[in-house]
Amino acid sequence: MKLFRSFQELNKAIEKDIRQKINNALENEVAEAAKAVVQNNIQETVYDAGYPSWYQRRYYNNGLIDEDNLAVSVRDGELTISNTAKARYPSWERKLRASGTTLSNLIIKGYGDRDQWYNQPRPYMENAENELEDNNKIQAAIDAGLARQGIRRTG
């Protein structure tokens, strides 16, 4: 058992432990819940916007919606999800990198003259953030993650 010389030292240790447990819940339960919402919004905002006739979508095979392309990072109690999907063809990926953007940002912001469904903005991340703010999935995931680590919230 660790001994503390002061209440201040004890309080700091408790705060550090709780921050670590919150970050752990964010990395696990909250990330899974948030990624599911992002995937749902990719389907609705990007894929359901139209159906291309000149290329085949990759979907769960290294496409935007593939969970392996949803990178999670947690820092100081903040969860960030970014989409790391690369363009289908290396030459397209090189052009994107040279222009300082990514496939995800291109789809989110739109491109070209925006006269077709496929080059209009499809803000799936913003839609996912709005959905997460409007429901209690995140709070339920935080509660589950903390409960897994022995902390239960009342009220």
Image: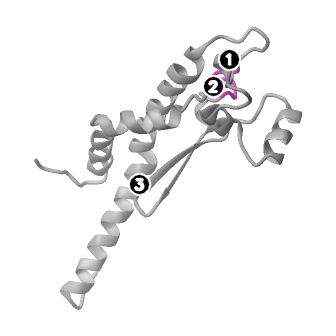
Are the residues at dot 3 and dot 2 in contact (C-beta closer than 8 Å)? no
Task: Decide which of tag 3 and tag 2 comes sooner along the chain.
Answer: 3
Tell us which disc is closer to us: 3 or 2.
Answer: 2
Membership of 62 in magenta stretch? yes
Q: CA distance from mark 3 to mark 2?
A: 37 Å
Tell us which disc is closer to us: 3 or 1.
Answer: 1
Residue 135 is drawn in which quadrant? top left
Q: Is residue 26 left or right of residue 113?
A: left
Q: CA distance from mark 3 to mark 1?
A: 43 Å
Mark on residue 120? 2
Q: Residue 37 appears at what percent x and percent y?
A: 44, 31
Secondary structure, magenta segment, majority class: loop
Are the residues at dot 2 and dot 1 in contact (C-beta closer than 8 Å)? yes
Residue tagged 3: 24
Which residue is located at x 26 percent, y 46 percent? 143
Task: Decide which of tag 3 and tag 1 comes sooner along the chain.
Answer: 3
Which residue is located at x 55 percent, y 15 percent? 48
Residue tagged 1: 116
Q: Residue 65 appears at what percent x and percent y?
A: 59, 27
Q: Residue 12 appears at what percent x and percent y?
A: 29, 78
Tell me if I can see residue 130 in this picture: yes
Which residue is located at x 68 percent, y 35 percent? 106
Q: What segment is highlighted magenta in the picture?
A: 58-63
The answer to whether 30 is drawn above or below residue 20 in the figure is above
Tell me if I can see residue 1 in this picture: no
